[in-house]
Amino acid sequence: QLAYLAKVLMGSKVILNDNVTQVLQFLARHSTTKRSEAISYGSIRGKFYDTETSTKESLRQVLQKMIQHIDKE
């Protein structure tokens, strides 16, 4: 989800850095997940370029929850 979120944010110009390597290296260094304390650059790069349909749907649900949270504020 993190890799796909980065792809979406870069595509929509929320993240202005067009250098995918720099963005993914930053995320790999500074992110953790429920399953792992460390994310490898290779793993996040692979998921950035090859996004599964289920990942897209999961991220869509997360974003919808965020929008609902914003609407409650």
Image: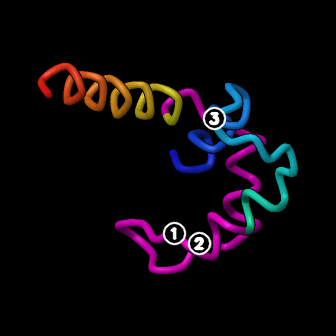
What residue is shown with label 3?
14
Q: Nearer the viewer, residue 20 or 58?
A: 20
Q: Residue at x 45, y 75 (%)?
A: 36
What residue is shown with label 2?
39
Per the rendering, the mark at residue 4 is: none
Q: Residue at x 54, y 50 (%)?
A: 2
Magenta residue check for 55:
no
Q: Mark 2 near mark 1, Cβ–Cβ under 8 Å?
A: yes
Magenta residue check for 44:
yes
Q: Nearer the viewer, residue 14 or 5?
A: 14
Q: Which callout, 1 or 3, points at the residue further toward the start of the chain?
A: 3
Percent of width and height locating residue 63: 38, 29
Q: Residue at x 62, y 64 (%)?
A: 27
What residue is shown with label 1?
31
Which of the two discs, 3 and 2, sits closer to the camera?
3
Percent of width and height locating residue 13: 71, 30
Image quadrant where residue 57 sits: top left
- Alpha-carbon distance for marks 3 and 2? 22 Å
